Amino acid sequence: MTEEAEGAEEAKGAEEIAVRVADGYFPVETLGPGRRLALWFQGCALACPGCMSRHTWDPAGGRDATVGELLRLWATALERGAEGLTVSGGEPLAQPVALAALLRGAGLLRERAGGTADLLVYTGHEPDEVPGKVWEALAGADAVVTGRFRVAEPTDLVWRGSANQRLVPRTPLGARRYGPHLARAYPPGPRVSLRADGTGTRVYGVPARGELRRLERHLATSGLRLTNPSWRP
Ligand code: SF4
């Protein structure tokens, strides 16, 4: 079988793989370099105190999707100039088969589009905490951010929520894109962006300590009161 035919077979298989997701949006500019498609997997058992995304914890929450559907979002984002894909959650490694297929398919589509967009995955795990087979699901990622969010250990380093979390490039593309940012601190100002539509208000990014409280207060002064924010127990 030619490489192209193998790729087509693989894409057909990935098409049907089920995945539970919380959200997906393009463009997001606060979760990695450039304008990115962000996909949030549903389900996380790690329950970090202070997590801003408690709505993603319940594995039965969110909605059903397929890897094929997510790859179509990625293809569209690439056509619109996406510079990267960020997979977050929830815990992406809780759905390793879907994650591996997504990254493989996203890598193929990226090559067809010119090969410059990177694939970044956030996981709350460290490499030695999960079976090797599960960790292998990250094989297609150009960079990963690893480790729990620890509310008592704030950091100024870009795209990391707490000082224990590590940003690790895994490919030459990842090294090129993330190497210059490994020790870079956020500039002063907001670290998150807001999106409001008919279904609610969403906060995208990695907030500084206290930023979400300040955001709530600021919105309240403008007459917008958030109900059931995802960072409240
Ligand atoms: S911060 Fe991430 S790893 Fe921790 S509970 Fe929230 S979604 Fe899970």
Image: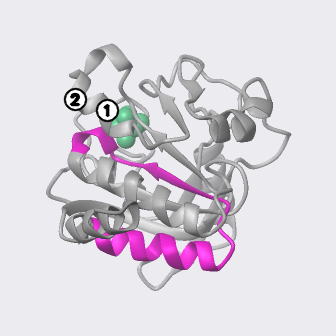
Q: Count residues near mark 1 (Cα–Cα under 10 Å), then give few for <14, some for 14-19, many for 20+.
A: some
The structure residue drawn at horizontal position 36% and vertical position 19%, both measured from the top left corner, is 127
The structure residue drawn at horizontal position 24% and vertical position 69%, both measured from the top left corner, is 66
| SS of the residue under disc 1 | helix
What residue would you read off at disc 2? 133
Q: Amino acid at mark 1?
A: Glu
* Spatial separation of the CA atoms under disc 2 and disc 1: 5 Å
Q: Nearer the viewer, residue 209 or 131?
A: 131
Residue 224 part of the magenta segment: no
Which residue reaches farthest right? Answer: 188
- Quadrant of the rendering where the C terminus is positioned: top left
Q: Is residue 172 left or right of residue 230?
A: right
Give residue 220's position: percent from left, percent from top: 61, 64
Can you say whether 155 is above or below 1 in the image?
A: above
Disc number for residue 136:
1
Can you say whether 117 is above or below 54 in the image?
A: below
Q: Which residues are magenta?
A: 67-96
Q: Nearer the viewer, residue 186 or 86?
A: 86
Give residue 97's position: percent from left, percent from top: 21, 48
The structure residue drawn at horizontal position 44% and vertical position 43%, both measured from the top left corner, is 140
